[in-house]
Image (tube, rainbow, N blue to C red):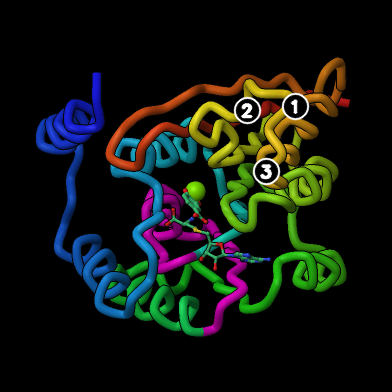
Amino acid sequence: MNQDAFHAVDQFVADTLLVEDAALRAAVDAAESAGLPAIQVSPPQGKLLQLLVRLLGAKRILEFGTLGGYSAILMARALPADGRLISLEAKPEYAEVARRSIERAGVGERVDVRVGPALEALPVLEEEGAGPFDLVFIDADKVNTPNYFNWALDRTRAGGLIIADNVVRDGTLGDAADPDEATVAQRRLHEELRGDPRVSATTIQTVGAKGYDGFLIALVEGA
Ligand code: SAH
Ligand code: DHB
Ligand code: MG
């Protein structure tokens, strides 16, 4: 097994099961032209997010980490017309690229991109009474994943989901001695969730066009 096979399978899945229309392709192209890193979710992962939005009947979504708006467009498209997605992005130039692509994709009315470090946006959301959310997708700076998760936990409805991307990190999640701060943060999040009655969670390892990583999916339990 190698990276070529992972690529080929993602490509086959995309060719058979996924739809990439002009606006989505334009979003990827715009991000590339503007020099954004190609670290958006893979197309099959994006489809999973869409399926989960639909399964949840989600109307309120919070995303940490917009980049060029790829995952935001996919999730927003799975929302009903009165659904709303707030996406937090630290970099103004990324947010600008994302807003244009989101508009072009026809979901501008459903998506609110907020610029600034997510930790600074949270008190503002709190003040506005944003939420409760049906789905929270955590995909920003990885050292803060546990902080975002803990904030989201109090603001996600029972039966809602919190998903954190990039928790496996080339398998370092399984290495207690790994010194990388981002890995330490994912391990700490898992330890914190051990026996926490407020959530039922699992982590799924993934391979694919984006390499070896994985995401944590947590179902928020009732009170
Ligand atoms: N969810 C996107 C990918 C996000 S990549 C997709 O799949 O299409 C991670 C993003 O998080 C980057 O755009 C990065 O600028 C942003 N980011 C990094 N630190 C952040 C912070 N403190 N607050 C908000 N966004 C941050
Ligand atoms: C990075 C961020 C991501 O969200 C991702 O899926 C892959 C890589 C990064 O910051 O390098
Ligand atoms: Mg990610």
- Write down the quadrant of residue 176 in the picture: top right
Which residue position holds label 2? 173
Element marked by disc 1: helix
Which residue position holds label 3? 180
Q: Earlier in the sequence, mark 2 or mark 3?
A: 2
Please, what is the three-letter code of the amino acid marked with disc 1?
Answer: His
Q: Are marks 2 and 1 in contact (CB under 8 Å)?
A: yes
- Residue drawn at (77%, 34%), measured in percent from left and top? 189
- Write down the quadrant of residue 19 in the picture: top left
- Residue drawn at (49%, 77%), measured in percent from left and top? 95
Query: Magenta segment, which residues?
Result: 67-92
Distance between the alpha carbons at the discs numbered 3 and 1: 16 Å
Give the image location of residue 125, x and y in percent.
78, 67
Mark carried by residue 190: 1
Give the image location of residue 110, x and y in percent.
48, 66
The relative height of residue 99 versus residue 107 in the rendered view (above or below) is: below
Please, what is the three-letter code of the amino acid marked with disc 3?
Answer: Asp
Q: Earlier in the sequence, mark 2 or mark 1?
A: 2
